[in-house]
């Protein structure tokens, strides 16, 4: 008999493989990535549509282009001890925790008391134009996010936006 944790892990990995069907594609559009390949995929810088634009967050575009209309999938690689202030995105998105433990909450300002602990295999939504915030603790995390672009980010407090800092 399989445990609930084993079944959840299998389901999440299947979802990950389905959602990342064009990551690192060859010319024929075929894709196959193992969990280890996902963990070791090099990320670009923090500035990408759909990211928080924080220096501690790196983005890997797996499928599509989050700056354009259409389906996209990105990986966020977030360093340990990172707090992401309240912000929103102009598109509906679904996230899956691929590695580490993610702490995620909804609201107009960062409130550690509203965070929910999301271990590997957890799924959450980022509803269009709904404010949310997140953090990591002692370990880095990887989150897969799929949405329908174009995406972007708007911080509740403009002073929290890394793009507004010189």
Image: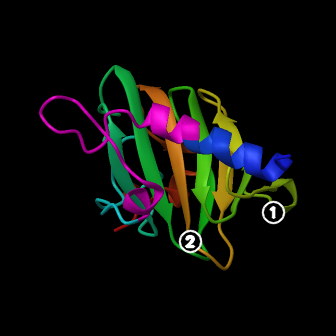
Asked if residue 9 lies left or right of residue 165, the reply is right
Asked if residue 17 lies left or right of residue 125, the reply is left
| Residue 81 x/y as whole percent | 62, 76
What residue sits 30% from the left and 31% below the top?
64
User: Is 151 one of the magenta-colored residues?
Assistant: no
Residue in front for this viewpoint, 5 or 44: 5
Q: Which residue is mark 1?
A: 112
SS assignment at label 2: loop
| Residue 91 x/y as whole percent | 51, 26
Residue in front for this viewpoint, 7 or 23: 7
Dot 2: within a 10 Å radius of its alpha carbon, few (fewer than 14), some, or many (20 or more) residues? some
Quadrant for the C terminus in the image: bottom left
Determine the image quadrant of residue 55.
bottom left
Sooner in the amino-acid sequence: mark 1 or mark 2? 1
Q: Residue furthest top?
A: 69
- Above/below status of 136 relative to 62: below
What residue sits 46% from the left and 69% below the top?
56
What residue sits 59% from the left and 41% below the top?
95
Q: Which residue is mark 2?
A: 140
Q: How is the image coloured?
A: rainbow
Asked if residue 23 lies left or right of residue 81, the reply is left
Magenta part of the chain:
14-39
SS assignment at label 1: helix
User: Is 24 one of the magenta-colored residues?
Assistant: yes
| Residue 24 x/y as whole percent | 25, 45
| Residue 99 x/y as whole percent | 59, 61
Callouts 1 and 2 close, C-beta under 8 Å: no
């Amino acid at each position: 008999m399989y445990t609930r944790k084993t079944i959840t892990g299998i389901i999440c990995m299947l979802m990950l493989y389905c959602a990342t069907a064009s990551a690192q594609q060859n010319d024929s559009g075929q894709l196959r990535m193992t969990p280890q390949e996902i963990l070791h995929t090099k990320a670009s810088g923090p500035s990408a549509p759909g990211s928080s634009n924080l220096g501690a967050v790196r983005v890997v575009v797996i499928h599509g282009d989050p700056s354009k209309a259409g389906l996209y999938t990105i990986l966020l690689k977030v360093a340990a001890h990172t707090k992401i202030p309240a912000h929103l995105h102009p598109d509906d998105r679904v996230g899956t925790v691929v590695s580490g433990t993610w702490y995620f909450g909804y609201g107009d300002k960062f409130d550690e008391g509203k965070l929910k602990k999301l271990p590997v295999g957890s799924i959450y939504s980022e509803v269009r134009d709904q404010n949310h915030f997140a953090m990591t603790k002692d370990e880095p995390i990887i989150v897969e996010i799929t949405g329908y672009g174009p995406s972007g980010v708007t911080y509740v407090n403009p002073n929290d936006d890394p793009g507004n800092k010189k």
